[in-house]
Every structure is written in C-alpha cells, then in structure tokens.
Amino acid sequence: GSGNMVHNLKMIAWNKIEETFGFDWALEINNVFKSKILDGNHLDLIRYQQLHKEIAKAIPTPDHYYPLLYALALQTPQDDIQFFNDKPVAGSLTMTSLKIG
C-alpha cells in the first residue's frame, strides 16, 4: 500500500531534490504516522488533522494521503506491517510505503 504521509509540493527544497532530506517537522510527522500504523490506531489516522500541530504542512490537501487509509482498511489484527521506501525527499515529501500481511 502507498499514499504519502507527508506531501507538500509548495515547500519542496528543489536544491535538495537529489538528496535524502526531510525538514524536521516532516520527519517527526512521518514517525508519528508510522507509530500509529504499527499500533493499529486507524482512528487517529482517520482524524489526522488532530495528530500534530504541523499536520497542515504535511497534508495540505488529503488527495495523496487517502490511498494510505484505503490500504490500511484491508489490515486484519493478525497482519504484520512492514515499511519500505521509507525516506524523505526534497524536505517536504516522504515516500514511505507499507506491506500488509
């Protein structure tokens, strides 16, 4: 499953597009999302606007975030979660994806 946990095109650091680089707020929010996913706390993920004071920077519009919720809806209590492609890009994007099962 995929969907961007942090996706702010307006704040991209174009001078660092080729580097693995994330703004502090982007890295922190990405970690908050991963923690909620690993805890199976889908309700907090649905109510993402209340998760963090900087959440509006991470998700200015939810169109790239919603696909992650659709993928998580398929998770059963027995399913393991594995993250891959877990790296920031250009400061304000994270391409973190997950494998369920």
Image (tube, rainbow, N blue to C red):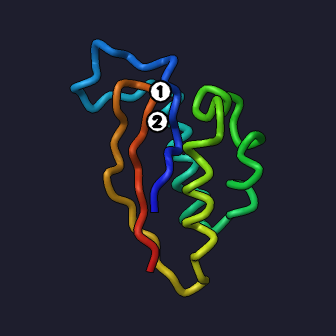
Circle 2: element type: helix
Left of 20 or right of it: where is 36?
right
Q: Which residue is at the front of the view, 70 or 86? A: 70
Please name the residue shown 44% across and 80% down the image. 101
Residue indicated by mark 2? 27
Q: Which residue is at the front of the view, 79 or 24? A: 79
How many numbered badges does the structure rendering display? 2
Left of 4 or right of it: where is 61?
right
42 lies above or below 22: below
Residue indicated by mark 1? 24
81 lies above or below 28: below
16 lies above or below 7: above
Circles 1 and 2 in contact, beta carbons < 8 Å: yes
In the rendered image, the residue lying farthest to the top is: 15
Question: Could you say where residue 99 lies in the image, as x and y percent from the top left?
Answer: 41, 69
Please name the residue shown 49% across and 45% down the image. 4
Under mark 2, the amino acid is Leu
Question: Could you say where residue 68 lies in the image, as x and y percent from the top left?
Answer: 55, 56
